[in-house]
Image (cartoon, helix red, strand yellow):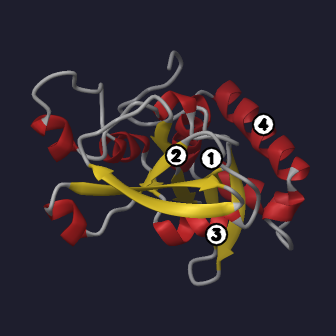
Amino acid sequence: MNDINSNQMELAEEQCKALISTLKARFEKNMNRHKGIQWANVQAKLEATSEKLWSLNEMERTGGEPDVVGLDKKTGEYIFYDCSAESPKGRRSVCYDHEALEARKEHKPEDSAINMAADMGIEILTEEQYRALQKLGNFDLKTSSWVVTPVDIRKLGGALFCDRRYGNVFLYHNGADSYYAARAFRGSLQV
């Protein structure tokens, strides 16, 4: 995070150009993810919002490979999801949330999915968003990803995660304080 001013969450001009170039190349390589969306319109939105660019850079930096997956017709914002083949490497081995992190007495992970997402300025995918992502390709064939957990499940100490196995998307539960080397979280951001 060298040239990043984390207080203002802005990237240096060279970083902005490099990120936009990376996003454009990914966009053009994966046109099936965003049919009917023109890159020029996405780029104009990106260039108009430095804070969102900072968040996209955090998604990229941690291995998420963000890409456009849709357009919110109500807000006119482009929707980005983490589209890395497996759960983002820079976000693995984290428990679900801060409460779970604090509850662990020993062998605590370094962070939680909810904390990391908030620090990055993104949202963790819901189960519905995760399933929508899986319609665009095959993701998490060897890993898994935490998804937003309903309050009633979380109150009982659990948290939810998903993966893709045997050609199907599965939803599972675990203790919210658990963490694994093959589990991270996928995020979303609207720009």
Q: Amino acid at mark 2?
A: Ser
Disc 2 and disc 4: Cα gap in Å?
25 Å
Residue that numbered label 3 is attached to: 132
Q: Position of residue 146 (x, y in %)?
A: 43, 51
Q: Amino acid at mark 1?
A: Asp
Residue under circle 1? Answer: 140
Q: Is residue 13 left or right of residue 116?
A: right
Residue located at (85% from left, 53% from top): 30
* Residue at the spot of label 2: 144
Give how far apart the Cα atoms at labels 2 and 3 are: 16 Å
Q: How many marks?
A: 4
Find residue 8 and report its horizontal and vertical position in percent. Answer: 40, 36
Quarter placement of the C terminus: bottom right
Q: Earlier in the sequence, mark 3 or mark 1?
A: 3
Kindly state the secondary structure of the residue where label 1 is placed.
loop
Rounded to the nearest angstrom, the CA distance separating label 3 from label 4 is 23 Å
The amino acid sitting under disc 4 is Thr
